[in-house]
Image (cartoon, rainbow, N blue to C red):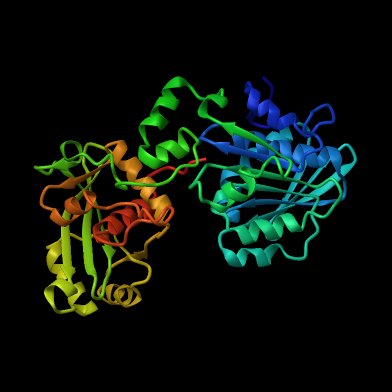
Amino acid sequence: MRKSNGFRWKALSQRQKQVLSWWTPQSAYSGYNGIIADGAIRSGKTFAMSFSFVQWAMTCFSGQQFAMCGKTIASFRRNVLGTLKQQLAARGYNVKEHRAENCMTVSKGGRTNEFYFFGGKDESSQDLIQGITLAGAFFDEVALMPQSFVNQATARCSVTGSKFWFNCNPGSPQHWFYLEWVRKCRSRKMMYLHFTMDDNLSLSEDIKARYRSQYSGVFYQRYILGLWTVAEGLVYDMFDRKKHVIDVLPELSPKSAYVACDFGTQNATVFLLFQKQADADCWIVTREYYYSGREQKRQKTVGEYVTDLKAWLNGIKPERVIVDPSALPLITELRKNGFTQTPANNDVLSGILDVQTMLQTGRLKIYKDCKHTLEEFGVYAWDPDKDDTVLKVNDHCMDAIRYFVRTKRLVKLRN
């Protein structure tokens, strides 16, 4: 092992070694157009891919520009850049980051190149990368990016010898990246490597077992087995009334009350009260407010809902009310009435995954009187006709739970 600038190099697996060397002259893949690394979380693919990308660029080019892309620049900095800078420094590279320009200059042995950071979060992101000439592009979590952004970025790689580096966890087998790149890796002359957690030699068996225990269903197949698989059946198939429903509320922390709201006009409006168990890292849905204008034949005003909320809380003062981000009139009314409110994080798949993790680890429970919430757990299902989409029926309590867990960031970020 070698330690420098706070970074400790550890033993590398065979697949990580392949990532680090596939582009070198002695490799049978040196003439390929790029590499695709997919598979399980925590499998060590990002660690190897990002460093190898820069090492390749610094070995083969000087005075060129490269793109390094994440879903957002913030997620790229968090998931890739911090460790990468330490890796590079440990190998004698001089790195100067220019935060205002979202780029870094890397120098070594008389060679200098510029690496620009881009976020590919939506269709408009392609506009950000237009006009630049690149000698290569690295995509972290490419399955989370729109095809238009990736197409624009790869089209900018017009320098002779340029290559593409794709890294991701699997999604649906109908995902555009799986169809256009993974399935066509041979015709596109791309090296393909599939990673599992066993390819990360720094993970102990206990840690790997813990990760396996946090997932089930489609996300177990994708994030633990590393398979491109279809989402089907119940979304929360791990929900168990014996495990997740409590008949008697335990002692609750006095300063841990949050309300999450899914707002509807004709559809139901839901408030759920979340309180933390005093002696455990567990959040409990302790109260439920559910009103359907369609079922009751009368729609309430936002003022009436806030009045109902006050009465329903019965003196409890929540730290925040987490609200459906589209419910602007309700957000305004809550603010007028002195509530501290926060627009919910509405990333559906990530929110579902976080709720699944909370259920798997026993950190989320439901009080027995929250009848609509309990009913929805039993019917909330994937749409069999649409990839990675849930059926928009009987989902109001499920949305409120997802808003709370995701917005409160109760599940640590995954790499």
Q: Quadrant of residue 151?
A: bottom right
Q: Quadrant of residue 79?
A: top right
Which of the two residues, 137 or 331, is positioned nearer the viewer here? 137
**Residue at figure coordinates x 16%, y 57% from the top left:** 372
Report whether 325 appears left or right of 228: left
Report whether 153 appears left or right of 212: right
Instruction: Quarter of the image for the N terminus: give it.
Output: top right
- x then y, percent, for residue 73: 60, 55
Which of the two residues, 290 or 182, is positioned nearer the viewer here? 182
- 213 lies above or below 57: above
Question: Is residue 231 visible to us here?
Answer: yes
- 142 lies above or below 344: above
Report whether 186 appears left or right of 256: right
Report whether 178 appears left or right of 262: right
Q: How many marks?
A: 0
- x then y, percent, for residue 408: 36, 52
Which of the two residues, 84 or 352, is positioned nearer the viewer here? 352
Question: Is residue 85 visible to us here?
Answer: no
- x then y, percent, for residue 126: 65, 64
- 292 lies above or below 96: below
**Residue at figure coordinates x 61%, y 58% from the top left:** 147
Furthest-right residue in this view: 110
